[in-house]
Image (cartoon, rainbow, N blue to C red):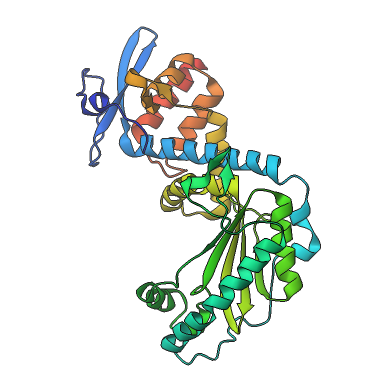
Amino acid sequence: MGCRNTKSLDAKPRSPNDIEVTGVSERPSLIKIPSVRGAEEVMKLMLTTETKLINLTGFNISKTKLEEIARLFLSHGLLMREQLKSMKTTSLQESDAQDIDELFAEARAVLPLFKQTMHDIVEGVGLMPEDLVMVDSKPLHGKETVLSIAPLKGRDRTLQKIKDDYDGNHLCMLDLVRCSIIVETEEQIAGVLQKMLDMGIVVRLKNRFANPLPTGMRDCLLNVKVGGHIAEVQIHQANIFEEKHTMHIYYEFFREMFPGGADSYEELMKQVAALGNLGTEGGQGEVSVALGITKLLKEGNLGRLRGLASLVGQKIGFGDVALELVLRKRIAEVL
């Protein structure tokens, strides 16, 4: 991800002091180390390290943006009320469907009633279901409406999910019928939630506005029982939903590289935040982490040098020994 200067990626070592790293397949990008005590050194920043730093920095920026959105749009505490806390009923597997075919037949039969019920709920809080959702006076993604009823989940995807996630139990599939509701204000979210609760159709509620994910993402996931069938409803705040795609890209990268859960994420993000922005604008407006690290080495900021050395070292998982050695050497010189 991110812009990259292809010339720097293809550059060849130009000094006998180049640090050679063997046993890796990635093409290295050269970082020019500023003269320290009169000696010029050149080291290789592995592309995997640069990619991780770019994505982790982006992850942190996206989370910061989500926290700011929450501060601006969710500041009244309406979604923290006791009656809106997460809950579920004793059993969610209440369908009489004997197999997947009967479950799909049940879902098709209830879909019109589900559409009408959701339409009435949205209108009941003063919103128009077909209205485009606006963010900064522009339609969200050019097409999102306040209420979006999804088509029935595909059969192949359903069968795979039942096999992989539910040990073959088709009654665990609670999202064959589903919709999303996207609104702008905290009051509208609370209104939609309260309307559903008052109707007695909610069998499960995950209020992630009150309990955000470690990424900073916030939404509400509900299962509602309509016409004897359990369906899924997602409620989103428009500005958060707009950032969701960007955060998901960074999150997927982070989850693959650092599968340590929330604690691992929190520790990692503290280190990334402490480093500040490592990207520096290079030629043709491209942002280069390599140039940013070169600048950091030249400045000799001890705290940031130590933070980066820890981040790229073996402990966190980068394992970029060459870069860590250069950073440790610069730290020793600053001391």
Q: Is residue 183 left or right of residue 80?
A: left
Residue 80 in picture, x, y percent from top left? 76, 56
User: For the view shown, which residue lies furthest in the top direction?
Assistant: 38
**Residue drawn at the location 73% of the way across and 58% of the way down:** 190
Q: Is residue 74 left or right of residue 94?
A: right
Residue 111 in picture, x, y percent from top left? 52, 76
Image quarter of the N terminus: top left
Q: Is residue 14 left or right of residue 295?
A: left
Answer above or below: position of 64 versus 335.
below
Residue 139 in picture, x, y percent from top left? 52, 44
Residue 239 visible in the shown view = yes
Residue 266 visible in the shown view = no
From the viewer's side, name the closer residue of 244 and 139: 139
From the viewer's side, name the closer residue of 92 and 177: 177
Answer above or below: position of 176 versus 145.
below
Residue 110 in picture, x, y percent from top left? 54, 81
Query: Which of the 4 image quarters holds residue 200?
Result: bottom right
Answer above or below: position of 70 versus 255.
above
Answer above or below: position of 100 versus 202.
below
From the viewer's side, name the closer residue of 91 and 138: 138
From the viewer's side, name the closer residue of 204 and 179: 179
**Residue drawn at the location 48% of the way across and 46% of the way down:** 141
Q: Is residue 121 left or right of residue 16?
A: right
